[in-house]
Image: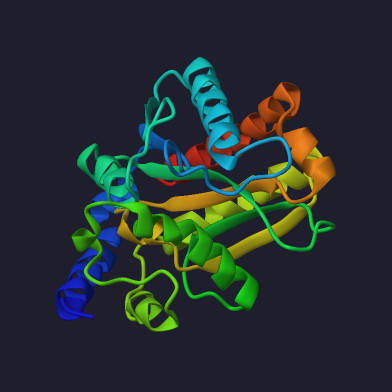
């Protein structure tokens, strides 16, 4: 793909910046972008009674309100607050332009096997299984619905060859992203009572394009009848949001204690 050299150079600059004295000794988590996946003409995946875009928005707004209530020093920004359709590029660009310290993308999962359930939190990286690749392809497939596809420079979400780009660059923020992802899955398992399927890596365009630690949270499977009902329960949505909040709080405290 074209511009790989430029992208590699940019990636190296990010790595260098991550080891700067400011990055190591004066880092504060003061601004977070919460991204409700899909929206508008893109419903995402769906179950028998619900669409991913609607559940993701409810959990995202709940998470934002919880952060505002208990961590008033943190500015919360949303990639969408209604049933709108921001592109993957616009979501990442929004976070970058606002100099966010974290990017948290909320989603729901789907698989052909209706017995599969549980949460997964992804960070940007190489997929190590076909299942991880399938999730990345599904979430990246929205590119095919977007009018301004030129910004993706020929990236085909269904082509394994397109993901070579991700294998040639290393996120400067991967370590911090993994730390937050681990905390989220820990909260889901120990406090929320969800079945955690663990922290995983895959080539998500929106994570790759954000210039900050970022995670994509799959909050459950709409293909599982029991879990779909839970994901539509306002109380369960609140539990999920509070689990992500506690992970965010612990991550913030950990990072800032190093200053």
**In the visual, does 23 lie left or right of 127?**
left
State the image coordinates of residue 204 (x, y, percent, origin top left). Answer: 44, 62
**In the visual, does 212 lie left or right of 66?**
left
**In the visual, does 12 lie left or right of 6?**
right
Residue drawn at x 32%, y 75% as measured from the top left: 169
Above or below: residue 98 compared with residue 213: above
State the image coordinates of residue 257 (x, y, percent, origin top left). Answer: 47, 41
The one nearer the camera, 222 or 13, is: 222
Asked where in the image residue 151 lies, by quadrant, the reply is bottom left
State the image coordinates of residue 109 (x, y, percent, origin top left). Answer: 64, 52
Colour pattern of the rendering: rainbow
Asked where in the image residue 207 lies, by quadrant, the reply is bottom left
- In this rendering, the count of numbered labels is 0
State the image coordinates of residue 7 (x, y, percent, origin top left). Answer: 20, 72
Residue drawn at x 25%, y 64% as measured from the top left: 152
Residue drawn at x 60%, y 65% as measured from the top left: 200
Asked where in the image residue 8 lies, by quadrant, the reply is bottom left
């Amino acid at each position: 793909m074209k511009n790989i050299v430029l992208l590699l150079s940019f990636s190296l600059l990010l790595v260098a910046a991550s080891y700067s004295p400011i990055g190591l000794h004066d880092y504060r988590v003061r601004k977070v972008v919460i991204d409700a996946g899909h929206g508008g003409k893109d419903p995402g995946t769906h179950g028998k009674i619900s669409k991913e875009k609607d559940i993701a928005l409810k959990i995202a707004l709940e998470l934002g309100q919880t952060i505002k209530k208990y961590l008033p020093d943190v500015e919360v920004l949303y990639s969408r607050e209604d049933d709108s359709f921001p592109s993957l590029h616009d979501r990442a660009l929004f976070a970058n332009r606002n100099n966010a310290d974290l990017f948290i993308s909320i989603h729901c999962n789907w698989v052909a096997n209706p017995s599969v359930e549980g949460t997964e939190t992804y960070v940007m990286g190489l997929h190590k299984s076909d299942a991880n690749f399938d999730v990345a392809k599904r979430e990246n497939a929205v590119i095919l619905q977007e009018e301004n596809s030129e910004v993706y420079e020929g990236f085909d979400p269904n082509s394994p060859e397109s993901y070579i780009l991700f294998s040639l660059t290393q996120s400067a923020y991967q370590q911090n992203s993994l730390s937050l992802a681990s905390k989220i899955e820990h909260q889901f398992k120990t406090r929320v009572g969800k079945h955690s399927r663990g922290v995983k890596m895959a080539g998500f365009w929106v994570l790759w394009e954000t210039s900050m630690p970022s995670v994509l949270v799959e909050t459950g499977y709409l293909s599982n009848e029991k879990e779909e009902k839970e994901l539509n329960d306002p109380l369960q949505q609140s539990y999920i949001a509070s689990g992500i909040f506690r992970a965010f709080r612990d991550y913030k405290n950990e990072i800032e204690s190093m200053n």
